[in-house]
Image (tube, coloured by chain):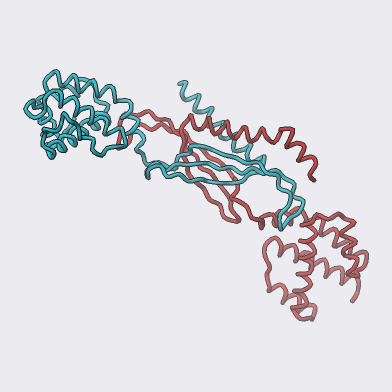
Amino acid sequence: MHMTLVKRIVGEFGRIAVEFLKKGSNPKIYEGAARKLNVPSETIQHGVEGLMYLLTESSKLMISDVDFQDSVLVLGFSEELNKLLLQLYLENRKEIRQILGELAPSLPHYQNLEWRLDVQLASRALRQQVKPTVTMKLHLKSGGTQTARLFQTDPATLLHLLQELERALAEVKSNHCRRILRNIK
Amino acid sequence: MELSDSVVKGLQTLADPACFDFRAFTAFTEVAFDSLLSSRTDRALDLPELKKIDQALLKHCHVATTTFILEGIKQNADKSTISSCLEDVKFDSERVDAFYTSYQKNKRNLESLLSSIDRCPPHITDASWRLEYCMKNGHVHNVNQPTFLISFNTEDGGNEGTSSDVNFSCTLEQLQDLVGKMKDAAKSMERATQL
């Protein structure tokens, strides 16, 4: 096949591979490409999936440009093609790593906190109250789903919670943490 | 204060010196208040001063008295309201005073008790945290980022204080955001209390 055509095709496959990584695969694309190139759709599928694997493994290990180029050398592509693949890798690795990160086991993570100050004036059990309360809505994201949980607390506990969490923040700046963060890279 | 017939009858019996002499009356009143505040309530009425009184009658008076006490606390009844209610059910002035003294003594604790009976979203009582440095996982290597794991302990007001937790993770920036927002809430609260 002519070199520029090959380059265009690889470029296109690369684009498809990245799309699939970001949004999920779509088998119909394979069929369309297979018809245009007059090859069975499995060939297209293997090509695209091969590229996806190359990109995810490289992104996962965060390999350097040199290491990437050495790796693709075995594929026997032209230098131009290798450059194309390297560019594809470098441009997309940050996002691919982010997507991969969501696959790892994790707890729901924090999205947002909304709060509201109320004063309870009465209840069925007791009239004539003046009870300050803080109502909070904690937005969490787990995998793809967002949840929001409602909580309440009293002023004294709010201050206690703040104190605890500020201690947590301060810990990151401690010598011990700084040393670890600096040295484990 | 609106009192049901049953409560009125019970209180009238309590007022009657033929049923309760003054010693029995004071012992009984103490028990009535204590039974509301303490968790050990079995055999509360098993006192020597009350032995001579019919058990069924005793129980009826106990229900009437505790209902009256809770109604008073609920509505924050003042001295004149309590006194006039008791006078209406034939309490003599000695018994009115004795009762009101106990009422005053226990008022604060009873108010706390009633105030804690509440339907509300889970109430946060404490927070714990853990700081981790994530190096790598099965899907991404070289992560090298500190992560916080936060746990809020909550208590569910309704069901005898069953506690549950909410656990979540956050990055440094996210924790700073969370703390910032909580600080805003605390500052607002401070300003509100100064009004």
Q: How many marks?
A: 0
Q: Quadrant of residue A66?
A: bottom right
Instruction: Confirm whether residue B46 shows in the render.
Output: yes
Q: Quadrant of the N terminus of chain B?
A: top left
Asked if B176 appears above or below B139 in the picture, the reply is above
Q: Is residue B4 visible?
A: no
Q: Which color was chain A given?
A: red
| Quadrant (top left/top right/bottom left/bottom right) for the C terminus of chain B | top left
- Quadrant location of residue A110? top right
Compare residues B129 and B30 and report the one nearer the observer: B30
Question: Chain drawn cyan, letter?
Answer: B
Q: Position of residue A55 (x, y in %)?
A: 79, 62
Residue positioned 11% across, 28% down in the render: B20
Q: Is residue A68 left or right of residue A56?
A: right
Quadrant of the image occupied by residue A56: bottom right
Task: Please name whichever residue, A66 or B9, is drawn nearer the observer in this view of the structure.
Answer: B9
- A161, above or below A31, in the image: above
In the image, farthest residue toward the front: B48
> Could you tell whether A174 is left or right of A6 in the image?
left
Report x, y in % for residue B35.
26, 34
**Residue B47: x, y in percent?**
19, 32
Report the residue that reaches farthest toward the left.
Answer: B18
Q: Residue at x 91, y 65 (%)?
A: A73
> Residue A111 placed where, x, y %?
59, 45
In this rendering, would B54 be left or right of A67?
A: left
